[in-house]
Structures are given as C-alpha cells and as structure tokens.
Image (cartoon, rainbow, N blue to C red):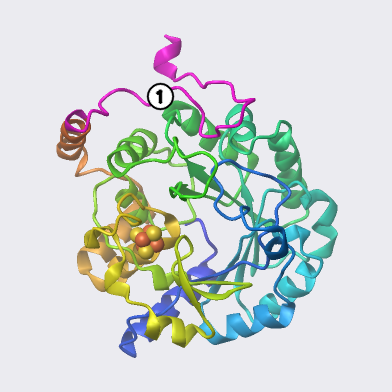
Amino acid sequence: MSVPVSQAFTICSYIIRQRLKGNKYYPLVLMLEPLFRCNLECAGCGKIQYPEHVLQRRLTPEQCFRAADECGAPVISLPGGEPLIHPEMKEIVEGLVARKKYVYLCTNALLLKRKLDLFTPSKYLTISVHLDGLEEEHDHSVCREGTFKTAVEAIQEALKRGFRVTTNMTLFEGANPDRVREFFDFLTHLGVEGIMLSPGYSYTHAPDQKHFLHRNRTHDLFNRILSSPKKAWHFNQSPLFLEFLMGHRDYNCTPWGMPTYNVFGWQKPCYLLQDGYARTFQEMIKETDWAHYGHHTNNPLCRDCMVHSGFESSAVNDTFGSWEGFLRTVKLTLFGGLGEGYRNGRQAQLAAQLAASGHGQKPSSTCGCGCSSSKPQESADDKK
Ligand code: SF4
C-alpha cells in the first residue's frame, strides 16, 4: 500500500459515510489552487497563460480554510502555479493540517530545499514533486535544464528530514515506455512513497498542441509502461484507475470528486474546463449540468480526457460500488498483477484500433515539450 493505513482508513470511512447518506456528489480531493503564477513555463501547462493581473492574485489562508471546510474532502491537493511562491504557504499548510486534512503540496521543487524549514513533517503532509521522467525527459518537459537535478536534491533532503514525499508525472505523446520504467526504478531506489501518473489534458491554450495523447494512444502507452509492473513500484492512486489508463476498464468521469477552488471561485465543471464559476461548493454542485460532460457525452472537450482529476474518483467509486471492483482492488493492492486477466484480448483489440486509426506505428521520437531547445528522444527500439 502506498499510503499510510491511517490515511486509507480515513478515506474509506469517509466514502462509506457518504454512500450511506446517499450522497452521490461527494468530493474526495479538493484541488485548491492558491495562485496561478509559476517559476517555470512548461509547454503543456494550461494554467500560466493568464494575463498579469490574474497571475498577481492569490488566495488568502482564510479563503483556503473556508473552501476546505465548505467542501469537506478528506484530501487536499495544493497545485498551482507553484505553491512555494505563495508568501503565506506555511500558514495555509499549517491550517489545513490542523484540520486533519491529508495535504499534498504539489511543487516543481525549485524552491523546496530552501523552503523546507517552513514545514514540519507530519503524516498529514506529503510533498508531491513534479517529475516527468529521468533527467533528459524531465528537463525537456519543463523547458529548463538543471530542473531534474534540483528536484532530486530537494527530494533527498526532504526524505532525510522525515517528510512524506511522492512524485507526480504527466505523460505526453512520444513518451518512451522503457525510459518511463527506468524512471520508476530510479524513484523506487530514491525512496519516494508513491508515484502518481496522468496523461496530459489537451488544453486549447497550451503552447504545445502536438503532443497531447488521444484515447487509443493513451491505452497503448500505459499498457506498454504498466504491463508486468515490478513489485517494488508503488503508485499512490487507485489500481483500477491505472487499469482504466491501460484500457481494461471504461469509466465516465466524476469531476465533482476532485473539485477545484481558485481565485475565481469554484470552477465548473472540473480542474481542466472553465464553464464558469460558483461562489459556493453547493452552488457549483447544483448549477453544473453534469450530463454535458464526460467522453460518453461526445462533448469534444472531453473526448480524449483520461486525467487523474476526472477519473480517479470514478475508479474509487467502482471499488466501493461493486463487488468486482472491490475484490479487484484488494487483489491488485495485495498481490499486484495490473492488467492480468485482460491482457491478451485487450492488447489485440488495441492493436486493431491503432491500426484502424492510422496510429499503429511506435510512439514518435519527439519529446513532450515543444520548446526550441528540445532534443528528440529515442525509443529503445530506435536505438537497436
Ligand atoms: S472528461 Fe475530463 S475535461 Fe471532461 S469534464 Fe471530465 S474531467 Fe473535465
């Protein structure tokens, strides 16, 4: 298990309480964006394109606490922008931890080593470091050399001081499955608690539009990465979500499971789309036309979306909503074996789908960055 027992127990008991109350629209993780400003300019990012007057705005600690109290999710993710730029991040983290929320401070780690003194190790605080691969891939992805080394040094220091540390990784078209598996080995050796994976969402205003993954390509890529996973790898997300990424399960999204609050208010309907804002969490739940979203609706904005913030909650609902989902989760958690039992049939189906869509070739050998300094990545097959 990649989270402590106390965290797993808190989340399980919260979900059971919500289900017993008959509450369909319950949040699992609050995505609390305290600011949009960042100290990197990644080509696949959809958050840093705001005009300067928006980038200057940030949530106060009181606004953060009100959002946390209002929605009641047991887990709070602090993405951004870069949260360590926020001058009151210490107060925000302390206030959320005091409320016994499991806080994931998501950072690119450029400032982490310098700012670690602001925080106290706790089972309620996890530092989630953005790393998109080994040195070459990560530095390409964030469009700045040296970022990987800085982040790894900060992770080592945080681990030494007793912090919980995980990593989060976004995968784009052209990712090399062999290198990703090597990256998992590296993180395991480094001693992080868990790895979080997600395909990138094709933000219409992100600078690089060429490298977002389409649905079949996502299935293919995650099958190549996660088939025969090593026992030592730990992922801090639902194993059913990973099987969903591999194409072995189909879910519609559950965007209210990870609602977003930022300087504009409660974002409708999800972390990725902006169809307006509500003043309160309840207003957002009531006013959003949920039937309009998800890939089953043929909404073009949702067609290729398989991101963590939309579908992890769907996988968790499956665990608690069906015997098959529950038993499968227990089996995968205790014994591993992602994708087993589906593999042969599903892989043949994937190959046929890819051939039919004209994408039957191996992943292209460009990086997921689009910055002018990018050096094309070679796949293992290319090197043979
Ligand atoms: S499918 Fe993705 S983009 Fe569409 S509502 Fe769900 S999470 Fe948002």
Q: Amino acid at mark 1?
A: Ser
| Residue at 53%, 21% in the rendered image | 376
Observer able to see residue 312 = no
**Secondary structure beneath label 1:** loop
Q: Which residue carries the number 1 mark?
A: 364
Please tell me whether residue 158 is drawn above or below residue 316 in the rendered image: above
Q: Position of residue 92 (x, y in %)?
A: 73, 73
Please tell me whether residue 213 is drawn above or below residue 269 in the rendered image: above
Quadrant housing residue 154: top right
| Residue at 54%, 43% in the rendered image | 44
Q: Main secondary structure of the magenta part?
A: loop
Please tell me whether residue 28 is drawn above or below residue 80 in the rendered image: below
Magenta residue check for 374: yes
| Residue with the most extreme top position | 384
Q: Position of residue 273 (x, y in %)?
A: 44, 62
| Residue at 45%, 11% in the rendered image | 383
Q: Quadrant of ligand 1?
A: bottom left
Report the number of numbered marks. 1
Q: Nearer the viewer, residue 95 or 307?
A: 307
Q: Nearer the viewer, residue 81 or 76?
A: 81
Q: Nearer the viewer, residue 237 or 307?
A: 307
Decide if residue 261 is on the left or right side of residue 321: right
Q: Quadrant of the C terminus?
A: top left
Decide if residue 301 is on the left or right side of residue 291: right
The region drawn magenta spans 355-384
Quadrant housing residue 55: bottom right
Q: Position of residue 261 (x, y in %)?
A: 56, 73
Decide if residue 327 is on the left or right side of residue 76: left
Magenta residue check for 243: no
